[in-house]
Amino acid sequence: MKKIIAAAIMLTLLASCVSTPVSPSGGASPAEETPGSIITPSPSPEEPSPSPSPLPPSPSPIETEEYTGSLYHVFYHFLNAFPDIAFKTSYGDDLDEVCVGPQEFWRSLEELYKNDFVLVNLNDYGEIGEDGKMKAKPIMVPVGKKPLIMSFDDINYYSSNHGLGICDKIILDENGKFAMLTVQPDGSDLITYDNDVVPLLEKFCEQHPDFSPFGAKGLLSITGYDGILGYRTQSDSPNRESEIEAVKPIVQALHDAGWYFASHSYSHFWISKASAEKVKSDTKRWRDEVGSLVGDTRIYIYPYGDWPKHGTEKANIILNAGFNILCGVGMPPYYKTHETFAFMDRQMVDGFSLRNHKKWLEPLMDPSVVYCPEERNNVPLAASALAGAVDNNGDSVYHGGVANVIIGGDVSLYGILGEVLRDGGADAVIEDGTAALFREADLSIMNLESAVTDIGEPWPGKDYALRADPSILSFLQDTLGADAVSLANNHSIDYGAEAFFDMLDRLSAAGLAYAGGGRDLAEAMTPAVFEVNGQTIAFLAACQHAPYMEWYAKEDRPGLLMCYDATLLSQAIREAKEQYDYVITYIHWGVEYETTPTDVQKNTAHILVDAGADAVIGAHPHVIQSFEVYKGKPIAYSLGNFLMRNRNDNTALALLRFYSGEVRMEIIPCHVEGRNLVSLAEPEQRERLLEQWRGLSPDAEITENGVLLEPGGM
């Protein structure tokens, strides 16, 4: 499962209403509050009233023993601080999967405490000797106890998460006590103590000091691109200096209380998809901008658990930057000391794992005790489906459950737009937060509508011959994280067969899969296949608009898979469906600049769904056409232009989610600035576009979050 919080969730700017803080202690009620006031937490009923004493009692020495069992490391994200808001936002599904709420977090602490775990510091597990080698250290714990590392990811409180039912920043109150500040829609400050990880863990350790016998608390895993701890300390922040001064006492107080820090990279990126130079610059930037604020650390927590193979250039870059305790993600406990570093897996505690990885969590806690359906008062669609998709051991039948696939429309980076990309860089054609949706998805797919080559001559007599410089392939990979492209369109062979072959070779060399075209009909009918979280997804493409008969792929001729009568494409879908869990079909069809699909489009789409297609995506009209749900399968007749000179100020992306044999499509409205720059639509424009597209789509319901449902399905 991909961690979507750091990009997809942070990209919305939705406003929300105010919620009352939750009391995690079960029976205790939250204190009376007024917006902007300091809330004093109610004492837990089990706490005895303190007796006056002239002198504090001397602490008893702790009897310890060396621990030799499994080494556990659990991690959480920030909390769904206001669950009644969080699960009703556009990213409620994601928050449901990767976060827990305040009550669930508190109960998990109670379970860990009941099961004899105590908090220790990961730095105490090993040290680098004078010979430069990593040496394991004996792990000492109170007699009968078990050591536990507890870490918390993305404790940055990203500014674009505001309004999602998440706190905005960590503060110190007038008594020097940790609290959380959230700005309400009316602009006033709400200060709470009972709804995020730092104040809650502090409170728990006050009540149970033996849970932290040596003073260790949690490991805060943070990025830097939007500042830290809710303060905008990044280099491009207009208030950077004042924000740095404001966060310094918070950092010091955390250190004093036993909290410590790890790098979660600066920009929260997929290391496996990035260049070595990107890894190097990102690591340095974290040291310069974040390490300079939080202090030295040797702990690096790989974003998404995506760690490079030990001994490779990327791995060595991180080691050479001074990080020698490295952490991934894995449900079984794992810790190993290597020659110059140590590696540890972390077990996630979130909504998804509490439902679907119960077996792995049971040595730590009882998931049925921790999980709180009442707190998740509006369980999202994906979570509802996943809840039943478990085997006899309580594990997800798909070993990860959800596959997220993001799809864009026409990409044609030739001519003027190619020059804009070349001269202005990626930021000139797509806003980075929007591009992050593609990088964060399990799969990203688009229609590549041009020849991508530096050879060949324009097809004789063709009015518009489009050719993009091969350098755009690195943009597709690095900026968009592209996994596959459709070649089935009316421009792929604009520069002739040899140029087409050159493009196929370049795509293969770059590791970009393609569908809908090939050196013969068999290749054109062959799907690109991916395995995501235990599920197999086949991607097929076809065209109804090849300008010349010579472009039709034959048994002995290169070209495109055509689907005027859908016979060959239906055959390819049926064959793919027999082998793979899901089939996505991308078609080039329709009439340019017409917002209503033709009868041919509609009939073809239904034939393809009947053949086994789980989603049908269209392109070519250069504008948005209607959306439909047919027999439970989503259809987007045209997503319009994605990265192509645009006559309109809008376009759309499609987010497909596959889980438990079902598929859901979410439409993501985007704005196009100056015919070039694509970004996510602002809330007002988003609402206007969704309403406009509802008017085009009599055969689908489109929710306020852009989710497609069958008519009457809301």
Image: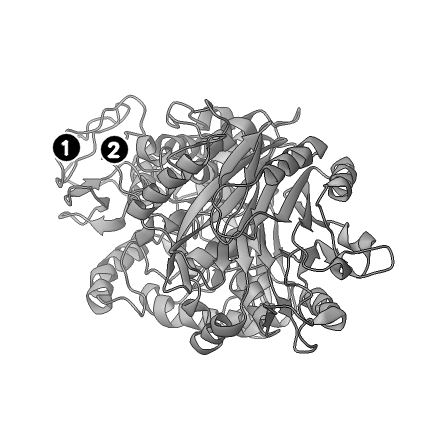
Q: Position of residue 690 (x, y in %)?
A: 38, 40
**Whether residue 133 can be seen here:** no
Q: Answer with left or right where residue 523 lies relative to residue 287.
A: right
Q: Earlier in the sequence, mark 2 or mark 1?
A: 2
- The amino acid at mark 2 is Pro
What mark, if any, has residue 33 been given in the picture? Answer: 1
Which structural element holds mark 1? loop
- Give the residue displayed 73% in from the left and 49% down from the top: 527
**Quarter of the figure with the N terminus:** top right
**Image vertical order of residue 182 relative to residue 222, above or below:** above
Most foreground residue, 598 or 7:
598
- Give the residue displayed 74% in from the left and 52% down from the top: 561
Mark 2 vs 1: CB contact within 8 A: yes
Q: Position of residue 211 (x, y in %)?
A: 40, 39
What mark, if any, has residue 21 been given in the picture? Answer: 2
- The amino acid at mark 1 is Glu
**Image vertical order of residue 52 relative to residue 455, above or below:** above
- Give the residue displayed 53% in from the left and 30% down from the top: 355
Most foreground residue, 112 or 514:
514
What mark, if any, has residue 83 been given in the picture? Answer: none
**Image vertical order of residue 433 relative to residue 580, above or below:** below
Report the colour scheme: one colour
